[in-house]
Image (cartoon, rainbow, N blue to C red):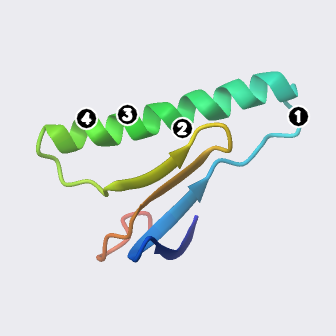
Amino acid sequence: MAEGEFLGYRAVFKLRLRKPYRAPELDQQIVSRRTVAEVRNLLLLREHGVRVPVVLFADPLEGLVVMEKVEGVVLRD
């Protein structure tokens, strides 16, 4: 995860890392499917009124999701 700016918005860049122990074809398929599933779930949650970050860009082949930066307490910490 990294923070920055994307198209004038404060953004978070999430890149799914490749796993060197997996076969490259399998890894590509897993990364792509998980990226698409994450974006799809964020969009569905937003449609149902849940406050989630807006997806600004997604590249399933690279495993990249760019979403708006939401200010507040990080729950992980």
The secondary structure type at the circle numbered 1 is loop
Give the percent coordinates (x, y) of residue 19. 80, 40
Q: Are marks 2 and 3 in contact (CB under 8 Å)?
A: no
Per the model, the C-alpha gap separating discs 3 and 4 is 6 Å
The amino acid on which the numbered mark 2 sits, given as a three-letter code, is Thr
Where is residue 42, by image quadrant? Answer: top left
Residue that numbered label 4 is attached to: 44
Per the model, the C-alpha gap separating discs 2 and 3 is 9 Å
- Which comes before the other along the chain, label 4 or label 1? 1
The secondary structure type at the circle numbered 3 is helix
Marking on residue 35: 2
The amino acid on which the numbered mark 4 sits, given as a three-letter code, is Leu
Q: Residue at x 85, y 29 (%)?
A: 24
Marking on residue 21: 1
* Quadrant of the frame with the N terminus: bottom right
Residue that numbered label 3 is attached to: 40
